[in-house]
């Protein structure tokens, strides 16, 4: 039987900030895609922040062979991460 992980305050704050950044970047990209807000000239920064936030949760883009790929239309893979969250 596995032990239940107890979250301390720093882990909760770190996860909340990462989820907040992920939501912010996703909202910026979505509103730009749907032409709801003011048109943004360059979405490179929000797109890179979105990718980095997903990577911090262990989600990354791979092709069918399990190798990383930057091509569109590839599958996503959730990798098991070990260690704790936050700054040590």
Image (cartoon, rainbow, N blue to C red):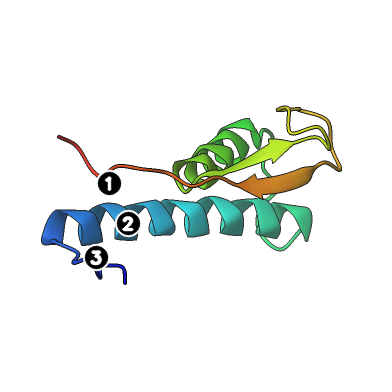
Q: Is residue 9 left or right of residue 27?
A: left
Which numbered disc, 3 or 1, marks the residue that appears first in the sequence?
Answer: 3
Q: Residues within 10 Å of mark 3 (few under 14, many from 20)?
A: few
Circles 1 and 2 in contact, beta carbons < 8 Å: yes
Relative to residue 68, is residue 34 depicted above or below? below
Relative to residue 83, is residue 36 depicted above or below? below
Which residue in the structure is indicated by mark 1? 85
Label 3 vs label 2: CA separation?
14 Å
Which residue in the structure is indicated by mark 3? 5
Label 1 vs label 2: CA separation?
8 Å
Residue at left offset 78%, top offset 61%: 34
Q: Residues within 10 Å of mark 1 (few under 14, many from 20)?
A: some
Residue 82 vs residue 85, the one in the foreground: 82
Label 1 secondary element = loop
Residue 50 vs residue 54, the one in the foreground: 54
Label 3 vs label 1: CA separation?
12 Å
Residue at left offset 57%, top offset 40%: 46
Residue at left offset 27%, top offset 46%: 85
Disc sitting over residue 29 in the figure: none
Query: Residue 32 appears at what percent x and percent y?
Result: 71, 52
Label 3 secondary element = loop
Residue at left offset 48%, top offset 47%: 80
Query: Residue 74 appears at what percent x and percent y?
Result: 82, 41
Q: Quadrant of residue 26?
A: bottom right
Which residue in the structure is indicated by mark 2? 15
Q: Residues within 10 Å of mark 2 (few under 14, many from 20)?
A: some
């Amino acid at each position: 039987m596995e032990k239940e992980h107890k979250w301390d305050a720093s882990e909760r704050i770190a996860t909340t900030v990462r989820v907040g950044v992920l939501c912010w970047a996703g909202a910026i990209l979505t509103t730009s895609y749907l032409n709801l807000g003011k048109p943004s000239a360059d979405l490179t920064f929000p797109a890179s922040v979105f990718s980095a936030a997903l990577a911090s949760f262990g989600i990354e883009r791979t092709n069918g062979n399990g190798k990383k790929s930057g091509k569109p239309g590839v599958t996503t893979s959730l990798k098991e991460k070990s260690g704790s969250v936050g700054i040590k």
